[in-house]
Image (cartoon, helix red, strand yellow):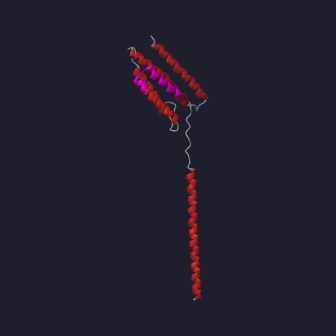
Amino acid sequence: MVEPQETSIIAQAKGLLRSYSDKALELEPEWPGQRLRVAMWQVVLAKKVYKEAMAERFDVGRQLSLAEQEFETAHQQLKDGGTGFAAIIGEREDLLGQWNRIGAAWATFKSNHDETNLAALLTELEASLPLFAIQDVESAPSVPYGFYIAYGVLGSLLLICICSAFYVARKAMNKQQQQAVRHQSAV
């Protein structure tokens, strides 16, 4: 009977993956190991779906839908976040694009479980691993310094113009008053 041996091997592989990623996280806590672990596990799940599809074709398997659901859950967790890791941030367009390519390859594979579609899906999954291993760094909000400088200069110019207008108006009023006083003293 192959099934218990396969389950045991998968459990051992998952345990090793967890062990190695836990050690790496101890050494580098900022490393996105939890997310990478799920991405690496997706590769195993894709192969499991293929195995279940083949078993179902020969009428010896009945877990295809469960395997597909496991893959889809892991895929959604990679985008929306899961236990121990956050969702993909908007600045990571590279990762979002790869996630979408995996989704497209998955849809093709799910509709036709053949080796060609599995190979295409595995190619996309393996291409995603280095991307999922990169720590997300949100860019600092950009301050529109040019905006502040431009409005500061414009405000200063406006203030200078207003002060100049008051100065010119005041000088003109003083001149008129002096002429009025001279005109009255002459009379």
Residue 12: x %, y % from top left: 52, 18
Residue 154 seen in render: yes
Report whether 75 appears left or right of 147.
left
Residue at the spot x=57%, y=61% of the render?
157
Residue 145 vertical position relative to residue 158 in the rendered view, above or below = above
| 118 is within the stretch colored magenta | yes
Q: Is residue 164 left or right of residue 120?
A: right
Residue 87 in view of the camera: no
- Check if residue 182 falls in the magenta segment: no
Q: Residue at x 44, y 24 (%)?
A: 70
Quarter of the figure that contains the C terminus? bottom right
Residue at 48% across, 31% down: 99
Which residue is the extreme one toward the bottom? 187
Q: Is residue 164 above or below residue 31?
A: below
Whether 2 is drawn above or below 114: the answer is above
Magenta part, dominant SS: helix
- Residue 165, image x and y in percent? 56, 69
> Foreground: 168 or 4?
168
Q: Residue 82's spot in the image, x, y percent? A: 48, 31
Foreground pick, 160 / 87: 160
Q: x%, y% of residue 59?
A: 38, 14
Question: What residue span does the magenta drawing correspond to?
Answer: 107-127
Looking at the figure, which quarter contains the N terminus? top left
Which quadrant of the view contains residue 32?
A: top right
| Residue furthest to the right | 27
Q: Name the residue furthest front.
A: 116
Given the current orientation, which residue lies at the most extreme left position?
59
